[in-house]
Amino acid sequence: MNSLDAFDRALAALHQAALDDAHWPAAATLIEELCGTTGNVLTVSEGSGEELRVHFYQHFYRGEPREDLTRLYLEVYYPQDEAPPRVIERPAGQVIHAPELYTERELKTSVAYNEGYRRLHNQNGLITRFEGLDGLRIVWALNDPVDSDGWQPAQLRLIESLLPHVRQFVRVRQALVGADALSAGLTGLLENGRIGVLHLDRSGRLLAANTPGRDILRRGEGLSDRDGALHASLPADDGRLRRLLKRALPVFGSAKPPAGGSMRIQRPLLRSRLELHVHPVETEQADFGGRRVAALALVVDPESRPRIDPVRLSVLLGLSPSESVVSALLAEGRPVREIAATAGYKESYVRWLLKQVYKKQGVSGQIALVQRVLTAYAFPRR
């Protein structure tokens, strides 16, 4: 199998894994084989130091999930590792050789690097970070190379070409988490009432839509369909949408695989923007020209989020008025920047308030707090 075939297989597995957790181990294994690495680590977290809150951390080594290595790093070596804050300081998408994160002195004295990274098979690994939503930190690391001669230029170019696809994988997963739709599957997503779901054929025409998706298109505020083709209201947005769909849809005979992407779509009257995630849908079956789902579009409407009364929430959870306001807005799905603008607070103050709520409620981050709020508020999950 040549490198292009291997890349296509890894990309197809990554597309499947974005919609179903069960496919992630296979995708991780194919990525290891493609990149010539002994393993890989994907993490999503917020905070740092003692305030680190891990939302996702999975370490694969030679195709097998290694929870023991995850615990070993987080419990033993992370508290004394000099590298994490330096990774965050580097530009998003930059591939960093692990030794570059340490000073010459630390390369000799660091317990995390000399002992921990050796046990984790990452002393000669590669690390990069992606921009996360609302302060979330996404880090992807590749373990030591299989080749004893180290990383080769062709490998590095291949890894860099894979980065935007891994980033999009995480974005789609986060959108599905927000809609409580993880592992719902392609058909099951149409039954979800918390996010707009559109099925597109290979020409980008609409095949099916769930109720929120149809409502968004019917209103035509920012996004609409004309004879089955998606269009954005503003010309600039429509041009970006055309390019996004072109990249995500398969072209018969093309050596370039489809790639997902995301954009925000402006609506009139200064209303909040729609978030659109377009994701390729792979199939191994020939369709002989029949219409099938070739891409999935997820549309997030910030204004369709549930409304939570902060006064009632304050009583239910024993929060101060300010704490209940930011907790309610967070549970409605609003990012820190929007919470600050809505409540009239500085972003730093919002983050400080959330930390106080985490401590009061004994939870470890935004996702856990949202679950606590929705449970206490007895909000019906659709």
Image (spheres, grey):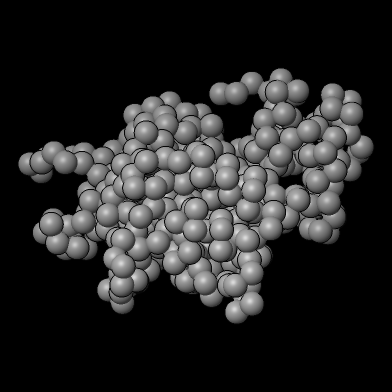
| Observer able to see residue 178 | yes
| Observer able to see residue 297 | no
Please give left or right for residue 33 compared with residue 79 in the image: left
Residue 186 vertical placement versus 251 (above, below): above
Please give left or right for residue 69 compared with residue 34 in the image: right
Q: Nearer the viewer, residue 23 or 221?
A: 23
Occupied quadrant, residue 32: bottom left
Residue 58 vertical placement versus 194 (above, below): below
Please give left or right for residue 54 compared with residue 217 in the image: right
Quarter of the rendering occupied by the N terminus: bottom left
Q: Where is residue 295 drawn, in percent x and y? A: 31, 46
Q: Nearer the viewer, residue 11 or 308?
A: 11
Which residue is most to the right?
320
Quarter of the rendering occupied by the C terminus: top right
Q: Nearer the viewer, residue 122 or 363?
A: 122
Q: Where is residue 261 drawn, in percent x and y? A: 41, 57
All told, the count of numbered labels is: 0
Residue at figure coordinates x 47%, y 29% from the top left: 192
Please give left or right for residue 210 compared with residue 339 in the image: left
Residue at figure coordinates x 27%, y 54% from the top left: 33
Occupied quadrant, residue 191: top left
Q: Where is residue 327 drawn, in percent x and y? A: 78, 39
Residue at figure coordinates x 34%, y 29% from the top left: 187
Residue at figure coordinates x 70%, y 50% from the top left: 52
Q: Where is residue 380 drawn, in percent x and y? A: 64, 21
Which residue is most to the left?
288
